[in-house]
Image (cartoon, helix red, strand yellow):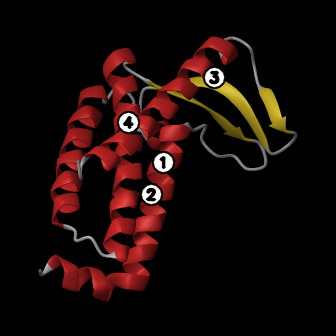
Amino acid sequence: MKAFFPSAVLAILVFIDQLTKSLARTNLMNQGDFSIIDGILSLSYHTNQGMAFGLFKGGRWFFLTFAVIILMIVIYYYRRLGEDKISKLVKACLIIICAGAIGNSIDRLLNGYVIDFFKTEFINFPIFNVADIYVVVGTISLALLYIFFSKELESDDNE
């Protein structure tokens, strides 16, 4: 029962990612940009065969292999964490990062590309998706936890 909650949260996050991509495909493909906040954010259907910023196009199997390796490392580390407050926050970050990795891996596996649809208009930034948001938010949160609570986390690792 202990693994049910994190697994359920992970499944819900992946579902949300896949749902938004399906909605983007259905409603945005061949439609042009749809402004959400004029001059700031719009929705625009794009496919990305590479990774972040469109780098390394055509590396589908490399990305899938890399994602599996990262997921195995995260699961190993997740299982070593304790149940104190800080460790639970780290676990939450790891679940969010995994949801992003799984969401984009599903796209790569099934389609050969990732569907992106959030487009910033105030800066020249790559178009992104919900899974990308998960990875960025989870990684930044994890980094902040390590910056501010590294001593607590180090003592937890040694137990």
Q: Name the residue under label 2.
A: 138
Query: Which of the two marks, 1 or 3, is nearer to us in this view?
Result: 1
The residue to which callout 3 is attached is 45
Could you classify mark 2 by the number of other residues whose Cα lies within 10 Å: few (under 14), some (14-19), or many (20 or more)? Answer: many
Sequence-first tag of 4 and 1: 4
Instruction: Report the residue that reaches farthest toward the front.
Output: 1
Q: What residue type is labelled 2?
A: Gly
Query: Taking 136 as reference, is 61 above or below it?
Result: above
* Label 1 element class: helix
Q: Which residue is drawn at 40% across and 33% down?
A: 104
Q: Crowdedness of circle 1 by 10 Å Cα count: few (<14), some, many (20+)?
A: many
Instruction: Name which quarter of the figure residue 30 lies in.
Output: top right
The secondary element bearing badge 3 is classed as: strand
- Looking at the picture, tell me which residue is in the foreground, 67 or 47: 67
Residue position for label 1: 134
Q: Are marks 3 and 2 in contact (CB under 8 Å)?
A: no
